[in-house]
Amino acid sequence: MMGYMSYGFVLLIAAGLLVKKIVPSGWSRWVLLAMSLVFLAAAGGYQSFLFWGISTAAGYAAALLIEKYPSGCPDGTLSRNGDYPAGQERDKAGTLRKRRLVLILAVAFQLGLLAYFKYANLPFYTLEAIGEITGRVFEYEPKERLALFGISFYTLMVIGYDADVYRGEIRAVRHFPVFSLFTGYFGHLAQGPVDSYKETGESLAWPASPSFEDMQDGCLEILTGLFKKLILSERLALMADTVYGDYASYGGWYLMLAAAAFSLQLYTDFSGCMDLVFGVSRLFGVKIAENFRQPFFSESISEFWRRWHITLGAFLRKNVYIPLGGNRKGVFRKYVNVMAVFFLSGLWHGGKWTFIIGTGILQGAYMIGEETVRPLALSGCRAAGVDPGAPVLRWLRRIRTFVLVSAGFVLFRSDSLSMAGQVLIGMVQKSRYPEWESGVFYTGINVADFTVLAVGLVILFLMSLWREKHGDEKIIRGERLRTWSCFGILFLIMVFGWYGKGYDMGAFIYSQF
């Protein structure tokens, strides 16, 4: 099975770059389409290929049908608000009803496919969760469904595309292969980002010719992603897996350390994958959406979710939160809309209540609680003569955000609600291991690897701090220095990365969703 960390993917990229160099520049999108189809077939098999084709064809046809019932002028000019210009005598209501019906049916079809393959066991998981709460054991046989590669990501991209056509933000694509490249592009099919056609589709349809600087940037992004995955994420995974695998034997600081390790593992794994695919895309002249922006520098939960998995949050905000009324219908309705968005965010991650609560309902409750308490906190600071923007307070807020998010990720990592509850309760209990005498080395990681991990996390922190302060400004300047930096990072990865005979590296976490 081909994945981003496989030799097959490396060969695919090398072959694609070679062919792209040989063929005329106007053929670049055909090269990308051929690579994407090969990747999908190799990674997901013919079933994934088939249902991706069905979903793509349905989204393509729906957009054309939506435009058959225009919301703009007779000459085809679209109106953003869906109204006809003044003076046009048409049956607006009937036309817009048909237009809306097509969108509803298109979205229902896409969600129906997703629900069938991904959420068939949700009712049974719900009964299981109720049984855990009430103390009754519920046994069931899980329904077997095909695990379709990339369905969680391309489904949202197709829905977002049809919705954008409905709103008149873009025109429907007439060229089916071009639309197929957008939904099936290998750079966002496996783990996102959830790209929009307006931002990424045109870049794929007409890839730019990358300059030497673009190639350098792409290589640095790829190596940064490999650094996060091979040096940091895999060591963090060993710590988290060791403790969570025998959580009843641990307690206190060990479980806290495992929770922190898993949060960092999730970040370095997911953002490492995004760096890798962003860099590969740069090599082909394609621009995909940013998906992370130093999330652990966030001072609140709402800020965290604007920085973490940015494209998923943007999709839900645009297609769920705003259509439900956003914050325009009073505070209570706003909070209901917030909880609806976070419920769907948790559900998107998987049809288990550990996902729905850990990355959904709990995070929404955090956000509402923060908004409720914030005015009181600001009033208290003013009364005490304390500057809320003081560096110490800002870092305390960042630590608080990390702790709250990590508590939610305990559910994300746990196999059941009862396991999550035992882990959280165990954090305030004493374990059978001596907590400080033997340090962290009961967590499956030796002194040498812990040292490499600690140094790597410091490097990651300093890189993130630079980007937090300087934005997109380049950390390394000068062509020669950047070239040598590529070789230096590659050397570190080869020496300290975990790979080789007998080593079974875990797949990127979000490829499961």
Image (cartoon, helix red, strand yellow):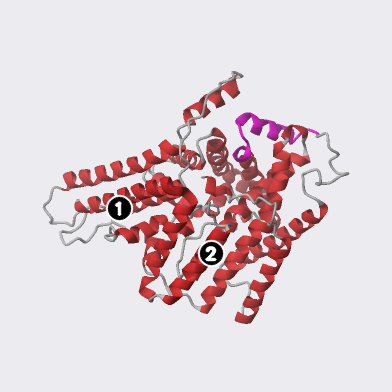
Residue 263 counted in the magenta span: no
Q: Nearer the viewer, residue 126 or 503?
A: 503
Query: Residue 371: image x %, image y %?
Result: 54, 44
- State whether residue 424 is above or below residue 386: above
First in residue order: circle 2 vs circle 1 = 2
Query: Residue 180: image x %, image y %?
Result: 36, 57
Q: In which image quadrant can residue 376 be found?
A: top right
Q: In which image quadrant can residue 421 be found?
A: top right
Amino acid type, callout 2: Leu
Query: Residue 204: image x %, image y %?
Result: 40, 65
Q: Residue furthest front?
A: 501
Q: Which residue has dot 2 on it? A: 11
> Is residue 386 visible to the viewer in this orientation of the structure?
no
User: Image check: 392 left or right of 147?
Assistant: right
> SS at mark 1?
helix
- State whether residue 122 is above or below residue 276: above
Which residue is located at x 77 percent, y 37 percent?
Answer: 252
- State whether residue 319 is above or below residue 39: above
- Which label is found at residue 60? 1
Q: Does the magenta stretch mainly form a helix, a strand or a loop?
A: helix
> SS at mark 2?
helix
Neighbourhood count class around disc 1 (C-alpha, 10 Å): few under 14, some 14–19, many 20 upward:
many
Neighbourhood count class around disc 2 (C-alpha, 10 Å): few under 14, some 14–19, many 20 upward:
few
Q: Nearer the viewer, residue 73 or 31?
A: 31
- Which label is found at residue 274? none
| Distance between mark 2 and mark 1 Cα atoms | 31 Å
User: Image check: 154 left or right of 224?
Assistant: left
Q: CB of mark 2 within 8 Å of CB of mark 1?
A: no
Q: Residue furthest left?
A: 89
Write down the region rendered in magenta: 411-430
Query: Residue 337: image x %, image y %?
Result: 44, 40
